């Protein structure tokens, strides 16, 4: 059973990890695909805006302004840097109109406001009639000239597309001769999506929320199932242990009864009244023992709602002293019994029988679990009557402190129980105190003894208490 439970728990945890990993992978893929789709859609919208006759005419105008400056460059009147600057200035002069047009197009195509576009001249080469080539802008240098749009760092941009344009220009050189230059021009279009993780997350928020809810639901379901499995396992172990324990407790009186009956029915008992009387006395004692065992199981299994209290106002100082007086008579000489009971005239309504049963059960446990110094204390704080019972016994482990008030729980070491009992004493005490509208708590460490605190409020005589 234990191995199966462990395998089921390990299997559930592995399945949860695998499912979580798969869900995370699918969510990430969905995010990645949505991001790619968003980029494609944005490229398409930008293409619809810029691939129009109006934008083409703007581009043609600044290119032609640039082409007209090439003869001056060839004749040495301006430098290469000045030629590039002429192109940039010509484009800049028309960029205001382009940006206004781009904004209108973005509104029309529902393009996100934080998506930017720019066009750059990434390569310009001049080829002269004599075969000479002159690179005005070299693409491999990754230093293009910004033309139109919104300028942003190259590493932040995504390429939309690139296209080539070639044009022949005739001019008069310094030798007063006609010369033709071929202009090879390459422009590249970029877009930048600013904070697009937030945009995608916003679009997928509902999906992420549903995925998160499913994830929490699965974790909760697995956790709940494991806790129930462990609880059922614990109940099964307690049930088996209780059956074994009560069986063991019943075997002794039954075996003694069997021997006594055989003796009583033998021919020696018929001729000897003393033997017969001893056998009858044995039968009566064992019968009483069996009855007490049955009563203990029945009575101590009652819940606090089933306990009917006969409430009467008493002085707890006197009452606890009486209990201690009677209990001290049962103690051996090696046990030290101390008291610290506050003298008070205050009264509280309790059931004397049930409350004394709870106190004596705790005292008996203190002796059973190797306590040699016992102390009972009583005080009143803020209308709460506090009874504390301390011992220097074996103490209670941290994990067992949460379990000791459970039905049929017994202190154990590994798979063996070193102390006799049915595991009902502290459960019964807890139910008695609950019936008085009080609480019972324990402070303990292993090998350092234990202290039980019984706290009963002064106004504990509610309607559901019968008195």
Image (cartoon, rainbow, N blue to C red):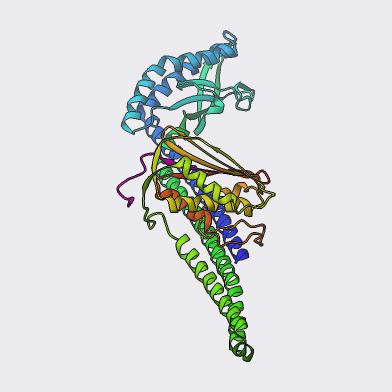
Tell me, yes or no, if residue 58 can be seen here: yes
Q: In front here: 162 or 181?
A: 162
Q: Residue furthest bottom?
A: 267
Image check: 68 left or right of 256? left
Q: Residue furthest left?
A: 463
Depicted 211 relative to depicted 60: above or below: below
Depicted 33 relative to depicted 50: above or below: below
The answer to whether residue 458 is magenta is yes
Task: Give x and y (percent) for residue 106.
Answer: 35, 29
Task: Give x and y (percent) for residue 175.
Answer: 60, 11
Image check: 304 left or right of 269? left
Question: In the picture, residue 131 is in which quadrant?
Answer: top right
Task: Give x and y (percent) for residue 98.
Answer: 38, 21
Task: Give x and y (percent) for residue 222.
Answer: 50, 55
Q: In front here: 306 or 1?
A: 306
Image check: 449 left or right of 18? right
Q: In front here: 364 or 39?
A: 364
Q: Which corner quadrant holds the N terminus?
A: bottom right
Q: Residues in magenta?
A: 451-467
Tell me, yes or no, if residue 172 can be seen here: no
Q: Residue drawn 63% across and 27% down?
A: 140
Q: In front here: 329 or 400?
A: 329
Report the number of numbered marks. 0
Q: Residue furthest top?
A: 77
The answer to whether residue 326 is magenta is no
Question: In the picture, residue 103 is in which quadrant?
Answer: top left
Depicted 112 relative to depicted 212: above or below: above
């Amino acid at each position: 059973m234990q191995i199966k439970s462990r395998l089921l728990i390990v299997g559930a945890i592995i399945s949860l990890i695998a499912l979580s990993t798969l869900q995370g992978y699918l969510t990430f893929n969905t995010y990645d695909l949505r991001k790619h789709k968003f980029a494609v859609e944005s490229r398409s919208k930008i293409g619809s805006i810029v691939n129009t006759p109006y934008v083409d005419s703007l581009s043609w105008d600044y290119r032609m302004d640039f082409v007209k400056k090439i003869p001056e460059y060839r004749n040495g009147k301006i430098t290469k840097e000045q030629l590039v600057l002429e192109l940039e200035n010509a484009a800049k002069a028309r960029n205001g109109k382009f940006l206004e047009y781009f904004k209108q197009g973005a509104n029309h195509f529902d393009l996100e406001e934080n998506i930017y576009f720019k066009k750059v001249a990434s390569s310009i080469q001049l080829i002269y009639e004599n075969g000479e080539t002159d690179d005005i802008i070299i693409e491999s240098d990754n230093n293009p000239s910004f033309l139109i749009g919104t300028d942003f760092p190259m590493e932040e941009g995504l390429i939309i597309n690139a296209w080539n344009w070639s044009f022949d220009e005739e001019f008069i050189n310094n030798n007063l001769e006609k010369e033709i230059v071929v202009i090879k021009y390459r422009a590249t279009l970029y877009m930048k999506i600013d904070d697009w993780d937030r945009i995608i997350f916003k679009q997928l928020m509902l999906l992420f929320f549903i995925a998160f809810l499913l994830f929490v639901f699965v974790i909760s379901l697995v956790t709940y199932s494991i806790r129930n499995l462990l609880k059922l396992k614990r109940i099964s172990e307690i049930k088996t242990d209780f059956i074994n324990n009560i069986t063991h407790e019943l075997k002794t009186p039954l075996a003694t009864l069997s021997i006594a009956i055989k003796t009583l029915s033998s021919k020696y008992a018929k001729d000897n009244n003393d033997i017969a009387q001893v056998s009858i006395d044995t039968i009566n004692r064992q019968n009483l023992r069996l009855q007490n065992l049955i009563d203990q199981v029945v009575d101590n299994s009652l819940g606090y709602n089933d306990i009917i209290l006969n409430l009467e106002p008493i002085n707890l100082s006197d009452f606890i002293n009486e209990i201690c007086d009677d209990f001290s008579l049962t103690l051996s000489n090696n046990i030290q019994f101390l008291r610290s009971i506050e003298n008070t005239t205050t009264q509280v309504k309790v059931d004397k029988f049930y409350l004394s049963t709870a106190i004596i059960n705790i005292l008996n446990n203190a002796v059973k679990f190797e306590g040699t110094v016992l102390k009972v204390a009583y005080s009143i704080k803020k209308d709460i009557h506090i009874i504390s019972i301390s011992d220097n016994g074996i103490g209670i482990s941290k994990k067992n402190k949460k379990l000791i008030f459970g039905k049929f729980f017994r202190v154990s070491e590994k798979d063996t129980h070193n102390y006799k009992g049915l595991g009902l004493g502290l459960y019964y005490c807890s139910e008695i105190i609950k019936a008085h509208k009080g609480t019972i708590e324990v402070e303990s460490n292993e090998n350092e003894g234990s202290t039980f605190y019984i706290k009963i409020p002064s106004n504990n005589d509610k309607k559901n208490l019968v008195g």
